[in-house]
Amino acid sequence: MGGMQLYSVIITRDKEMKEKLSPLHFNQPMINDAPVVLTFCADFNRFTKWCNQRKATPGYNNFMSFYNASIDALIVAQSFTLLAEKAGLGICYLGTTTYNPQQIIDLLQLPKLVFPVTTITVGYPDETPQQTDRLPIEGIIHSETYHDYSNDTIDKLYQMKEAIPENIGFVDENHKETLAQVFTDIRYTKKDNEFMSDNLIETLKRQQFL
Amino acid sequence: MGGMQLYSVIITRDKEMKEKLSPLHFNQPMINDAPVVLTFCADFNRFTKWCNQRKATPGYNNFMSFYNASIDALIVAQSFTLLAEKAGLGICYLGTTTYNPQQIIDLLQLPKLVFPVTTITVGYPDETPQQTDRLPIEGIIHSETYHDYSNDTIDKLYQMKEAIPENIGFVDENHKETLAQVFTDIRYTKKDNEFMSDNLIETLKRQQFL
């Protein structure tokens, strides 16, 4: 965004810090197992400090600025990811970063106008897992305008995903009727999403982005 | 995010569509000049439709889901960017996508639970511009905890940026005292940011993400 570089990266290598960070990511084992954990943050603190030191009046304590800085942070995160993989490293994105933002802010001592957007663990992989299943590309792209999905198209797009033995296993294990129910009833529930939305908005206010 | 693929990409090639899209991006010339314009969208519409068709009750009309889908869309956008550049194409990000989201939504016919996050123009480049100036890497990374910037550190980090002839030119042309003032008074003003924040929040509500 305008060459402002609205991001910071916090590098966690220290064992004790990892042990404190781990529960904030629901004890996913990558935090303690990977040698390096990177927390990519939207950062308008540095730029705002520069403005204040240069007789300029910054106006970045608002939602637009938060979203712009988030975009910057994610572009950097994904560039890092692809370069790391090219160099033979393995990575894992932790989407849990925005579930407990306040606790991560406290642990990493993020000042106002800094917000944790995503976390990537890095290390040399000892396995070569299969690619995650993906929808057919025609389910993702739209020519000129958005072509909304008919019932038939939805059936066709998700057919492959629903037929994967691992996914059929998840449906059985969880005593559900459909794979979609595994998502809505267990993995990403309405209740959790609403709770975390309130939490996210509250924390954005505390970091002065709302 | 959980293999949900919460993104869609709208491809604009049609001359007439580009002419309509151009003013929504403040008439930046890339829209009409580049052969292809890609609008990367956060998309919970497709997944929600699948849930509804599979006896599952989706709960993704909330802010957390919007932010998760935005992260997905940006990871895809930056992966595309790096692959395109590797293939000899040139790209340009348009940060203007979130300035007029409602008009882009109308033109591209984006349904509820779909939101334009960023736009990338693509084509074969006829020039090899210099890399944009960047802060020294030690200004971006933090070991273990965020180390807030002292006045001295800010001076040192921004020294190079402030010494670039092009940037000195911007200060002079705009009759400003400092480069920071070019950002705060002209490029990214408090007034514009606050106006656009309200706009963004209003449009998120209309798309049922808030």
Image (tube, coloured by chain):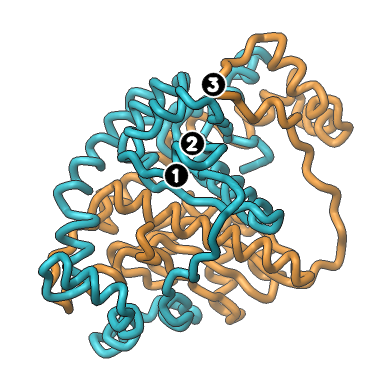
Chain colours: A cyan, B orange
Q: Residue at x 69, y 17 (%)?
A: B154
Crowd band around label 3 with a 10 angstrom C-alpha radius: few (<14), some (14–19), many (20+):
many
The C terminus of chain A appears in which quarter of the rendering?
A: top left
Give coordinates of residue B109: x percent, y percent: 38, 72
Badge 3 and badge 1 both on one subunit: no
Q: Is mark 3 on a helix, strand or loop?
A: loop
Question: Where is mark 1, residue-wise?
Answer: A30
Q: What element carries label 1?
A: helix
The residues tagged by marks 2 and 3 sit, at their Cα atoms, a distance apart of 20 Å
Instruction: Provide the chain ID for the residue under circle 1.
Output: A
User: To which quarter of the image does residue A88 belong?
Assistant: bottom right
Q: Is residue A139 above or below residue B92?
A: below
Q: Which of the marked residues, 1 or 2, is nearer the chain's N terminus?
A: 1
Q: What residue type is labelled 1?
A: Met
The residues tagged by marks 1 and 2 sit, at their Cα atoms, a distance apart of 31 Å
Viewer-closest of A24 and A30: A30
Question: Where is mark 2, residue-wise?
Answer: A65
- Front: mark 3 or 1: 1
Give coordinates of residue B18: x percent, y percent: 58, 73
Q: Residue at x 82, y 26 (%)?
A: B160
Q: Taking B159 as reference, is B196 left or right?
A: left
Badge 2 and badge 3 both on one subunit: no
Q: In this view, does B187 lie above or below A44?
A: below
Q: What residue type is labelled 2?
A: Ser
Question: Where is mark 3, residue-wise?
Answer: B146
Q: Is mark 2 on a helix, strand or loop?
A: helix
- Is residue B107 in sight in this rendering? yes
Instruction: Provide the chain ID for the residue under circle 3.
Output: B
Instruction: Provide the chain ID for the residue under circle 2.
Output: A
Q: Is residue A58 above or below residue A172?
A: above
